Amino acid sequence: MFIEDGAGVGPDAKVNKFQQLDTFSIISPEDRFANKEGKTWTIRSNTTPVGANDYIFYFKNTGTKTYAITDVRAFPSGASKLLIEVVEGTPTFAAGADLTPVARNLGSSEPITATIKEDTNTTGLTSKGVLFTLPCEASVEKHLRTTSNIIIPPGQAIAMQTEGTTTVDCIWSFTEIDLEL
């Protein structure tokens, strides 16, 4: 079987010793590709928890699209350990504030369909597991980069818990993804 040029010029595709096509391509990260369509956002949270082990950030996908977190930058005012967890339950917000995503494509008005809040002590949540632990030094940015992303399908939620009582300023990077790609 031969794979021929679709333009009808006639050259066959080259295959290397690993049974891979020999190609030339331009690679674009998924979030950059999504941002061309206006589907990448920054969300900033800045919270001081009431006590240790409080949930201070909550994101629940309430729409039909799938979202991914590509990275998180945390800047606590004091030493702390931050946990990003899969959660379920009905959140009760002590002093919850809605957060507004900012499109990274400045010409876009595409929304995120989700409940997005920062809070001093969100209760009513049950942890289904820790995705990432971020040990943080005082006044030093901690940057979580994950090539696998945290994928949040419709109906699913994540939350950030802090083991300390220090103010935590975070920048969250969200993108809409197509699981078919």
Image (tube, rainbow, N blue to C red):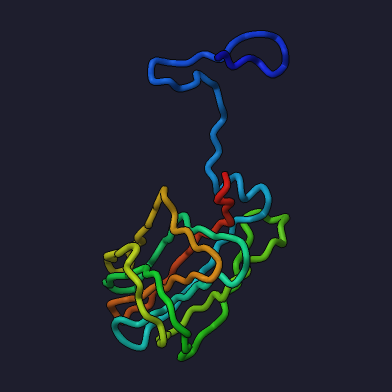
User: Which quarter of the rendered picture does the C terminus lie within?
Assistant: top right
| Residue at (45% x, 22% y) in the render | 20
| Residue at (42% x, 85% y) in the render | 122
The percent position of residue 171, horizontal first and vertical second, equals: 47, 64
The percent position of residue 45, horizontal first and vertical second, equals: 48, 73
Snapshot quadrant of residue 111: bottom right
Q: Nearer the viewer, residue 27 or 12?
A: 12
User: Which quarter of the rendered picture does the N terminus lie within?
Assistant: top right
The percent position of residue 95, horizontal first and vertical second, equals: 49, 89
| Residue at (37% x, 57% y) in the render | 143
Residue 77 placement, left or right of 115 = left
Q: Is residue 114 above or below residue 92?
A: above
Q: Residue furthest front?
A: 1
Q: Is residue 65 above or below residue 125?
A: above
Q: Nearer the viewer, residue 79 or 55?
A: 55
The percent position of residue 105, horizontal first and vertical second, equals: 66, 54
| Residue at (47% x, 54% y) in the render | 70
Residue 25 placement, left or right of 20 = right
Q: Nearer the viewer, residue 46 or 147?
A: 147
Q: Residue furthest top?
A: 10
Q: Residue furthest bottom?
A: 94
> How many numbered circles are shown?
0
Q: Nearer the viewer, residue 172 or 93?
A: 93
Q: Is residue 72 above or below residue 12?
A: below
Q: Is residue 96 above or below residue 66?
A: below
Snapshot quadrant of residue 97: bottom right
